[in-house]
Image (spheres, coloured by chain):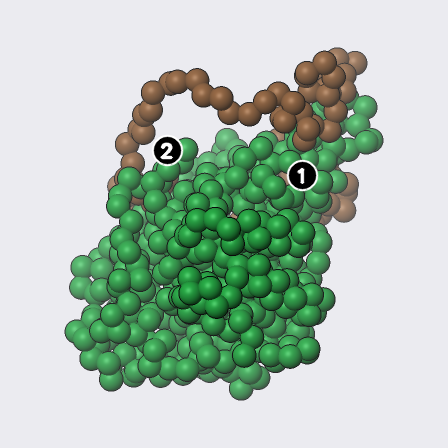
């Protein structure tokens, strides 16, 4: 029976770039426990030799010519940015 | 009778003969929104001023297949002229999408009138629209009940007569389930039939855009416009789009219907079962035949679906980092904190739960056991449909196991909420088209939906079957009684 450790939940939150409180961690743990237990029913299915489906349709690589096109302007793009300066996105310091 | 009670075809004739103008029609629609949307709360954004101006311009310009027809768009389809929130606090101020989705371009080419953006579960994750971070959309048939989700705003707006059609999206039932709960017609086209360019990604191997309307004919008319290959969506199919309205012949003689026994299990409400059985007897009278079939892997679809869709979502939603667009936390002291706090403050609980599940299922040590296992089961689910379609033209069952539920009934139990989708998720996993069409009402007066599933790229047969049934019944003529007129 699946039972995910609190530390493991915190590690997953870190991988997912989510800040979690102790309370959040408990909520996520309960949900992950419930759904992984629920998902264990998939083990009843014999999938020996079955190929995984990644996509509903059989598609080969779809290629197109790599041609530059006018898409939008820098000004337009920066309109949505929380912070920008001199035509660049600005973020808080990366190094301490 | 209000203008808005006519079909799209009737309105096109009136517009063409200059009996009415596009402006009058748009004004009638906006009037209706003002009258009932306080109760229904289907819209996040209404663009009254621009819509009326655009309608005035239309009246002096060229014709189109959806000329002047008022429409609402689910708020996860990007619109250059309108804020696109995806139901999330994280995008509450996303005022300047850089482009129109391909489906919006196609609607514009055929002169449809977009009046606004419709409420939804945040990032399309949910089955009741209760996960919207903006408002509680209500079921027009009884405002104590949810409209379904995630395209709850889209289904409610059409059912309430606010717009003639809406575009929704369906990853695991998000068009069909709210269509069933609100007594309207909704189709999830074959995966690849409609371009996903400009649809905010949830689970890319499952997502599909489709129309919600009051009648099958209106629905066929809108899908004709939005379907087709798009070089900007490499997964869109390079196939010719049939004229779906030509498929509405009313003739279902010798149509072979398969009815999956798994779709009429003891988990399905008796009233829903009875409505489906009545529908089958109508098909018999119309000359179709039906027999029971088995889709043996159906019971595993829900687990496979939640693992696959959440895994894809965890990757797709990694883009919301507070750098280029969307909200950024003001409390971050460095870049890592900015990522984490912006996401934690911006996403609601259900979105976080799915990101967590997806990250878990994709992480090393879990990948084979969960994600890949689910993908293998997906293959078997797809084969179930392929086997059944060797013998049958369509597969028919209920859209949902129950009718709409009350607010708050399932919000504390994610697994109970997910169980709503048990009859719709197999369709997305297989990629086949499926429609929900009204097939009656429960004793409480809540609508019931009939689900008609077709072969890959055979929307025509789905439309033909749905139309013949609709014409033989009068469910689609019933309207909810909202305050302030009918």
Question: Badge 2 is on which residue?
Answer: B231
Mark 1 residue crowding within 10 angstroms, few (<14) / some (14–19) / many (20+): many
Report the residue at 67% width, 31% height from top: A80
Q: Are marks 2 and 1 on the same chain?
A: yes
Between B188 and B274, the residue placed more toward the observer is: B188
Q: Nearer the viewer, residue B72 or B322?
A: B72
Asked if residue A64 can be seen in this view, the reply is yes
Q: Colour of chain B?
A: green
- What is the quadrant of residue B219 in the picture? bottom left
In the image, is residue A86 above or below residue B82? Answer: above
Note whether residue B360 is visible: no
Q: Is residue B302 left or right of residue B289?
A: right
Dot label at residue B94: 1
Q: Are marks 2 and 1 in contact (CB under 8 Å)?
A: no
Q: Position of residue A90 (x, y in %)?
A: 73, 19
**Res. B113 mark:** none
Q: Position of residue B178 (x, y in %)?
A: 52, 64
As helix, strand or loop, the secondary structure at mark 1 comes to loop
């Amino acid at each position: 029976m699946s039972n995910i450790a609190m530390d493991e939940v915190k590690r997953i939150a870190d991988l997912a770039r989510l800040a979690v409180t102790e309370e959040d961690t408990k909520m996520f743990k309960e949900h992950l426990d419930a759904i992984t237990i629920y998902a264990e029913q998939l083990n009843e299915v014999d999938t020996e030799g079955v190929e995984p489906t990644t996509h509903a349709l059989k598609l080969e690589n779809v290629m197109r010519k790599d041609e530059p096109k006018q898409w939008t302007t820098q000004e337009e793009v920066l309109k949505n940015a929380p912070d920008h300066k001199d035509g660049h996105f600005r973020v808080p310091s990366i190094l301490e | 009778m209000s203008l808005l009670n006519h079909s799209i075809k009737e309105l096109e004739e009136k517009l063409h003969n200059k009996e009415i103008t596009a402006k009058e029609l748009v004004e009638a629609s906006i009037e209706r929104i003002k009258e009932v949307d306080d109760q229904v709360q289907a819209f996040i954004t209404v663009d009254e001023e621009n819509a009326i101006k655009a309608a005035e311009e239309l009246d002096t310009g060229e014709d189109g297949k959806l000329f002047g027809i008022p429409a609402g768009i689910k708020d996860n389809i990007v619109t250059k002229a309108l804020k696109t929130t995806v139901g999330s606090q994280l995008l509450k101020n996303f005022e300047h999408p850089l482009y129109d989705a391909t489906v919006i371009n196609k609607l514009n080419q055929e002169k449809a009138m977009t009046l606004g953006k419709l409420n939804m579960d945040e990032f399309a994750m949910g089955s009741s629209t209760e996960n919207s971070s903006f408002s509680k959309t209500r079921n027009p048939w009884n405002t104590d009940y949810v409209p379904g989700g995630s395209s709850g705003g889209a289904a409610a707006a059409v059912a309430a007569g606010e717009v003639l059609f809406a575009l929704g999206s369906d990853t695991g039932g998000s068009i069909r389930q709210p269509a069933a709960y609100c007594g309207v017609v909704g189709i999830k086209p074959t995966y690849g039939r409609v371009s996903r360019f400009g649809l905010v990604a949830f689970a890319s191997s499952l997502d599909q855009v489709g129309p919600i309307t009051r009648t099958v004919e209106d629905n066929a008319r809108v899908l004709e416009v939005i379907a087709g290959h798009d070089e900007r969506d490499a997964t869109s199919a390079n196939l010719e789009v049939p004229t779906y309205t030509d498929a509405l012949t009313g003739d279902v003689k010798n149509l072979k219907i398969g009815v999956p026994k798994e779709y009429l299990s003891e988990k399905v409400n008796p009233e829903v079962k009875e409505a489906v059985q009545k529908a089958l007897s109508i098909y018999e009278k119309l000359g179709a035949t039906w027999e029971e079939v088995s889709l043996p892997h159906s019971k595993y679809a829900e687990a496979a679906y939640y693992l696959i869709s959440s895994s894809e979502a965890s990757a797709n939603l990694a883009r919301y980092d507070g750098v280029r667009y969307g909200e950024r936390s003001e409390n971050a002291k460095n870049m890592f904190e900015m990522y984490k706090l912006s996401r934690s403050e911006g996403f609601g609980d259900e979105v976080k739960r799915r990101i967590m599940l997806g990250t878990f299922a994709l992480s090393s040590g879990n990948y084979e056991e969960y994600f890949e296992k689910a993908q293998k089961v997906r293959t078997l689910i797809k084969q179930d449909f392929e086997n059944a379609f060797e013998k049958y033209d369509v597969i028919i069952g209920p859209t949902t196991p129950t009718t709409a539920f009350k607010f708050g009934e399932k919000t504390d139990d994610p697994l109970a909420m997910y169980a709503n989708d048990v009859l719709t998720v197999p369709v997305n996993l297989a990629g086949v088209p499926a429609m929900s069409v009204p097939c009656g009402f429960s004793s409480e007066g809540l609508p019931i939906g009939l689900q008609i599933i077709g072969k890959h790229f055979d929307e025509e047969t789905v439309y033909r079957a749905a139309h013949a049934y609709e014409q033989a019944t009068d469910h689609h003529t019933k309207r909810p009684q909202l305050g302030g007129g009918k």
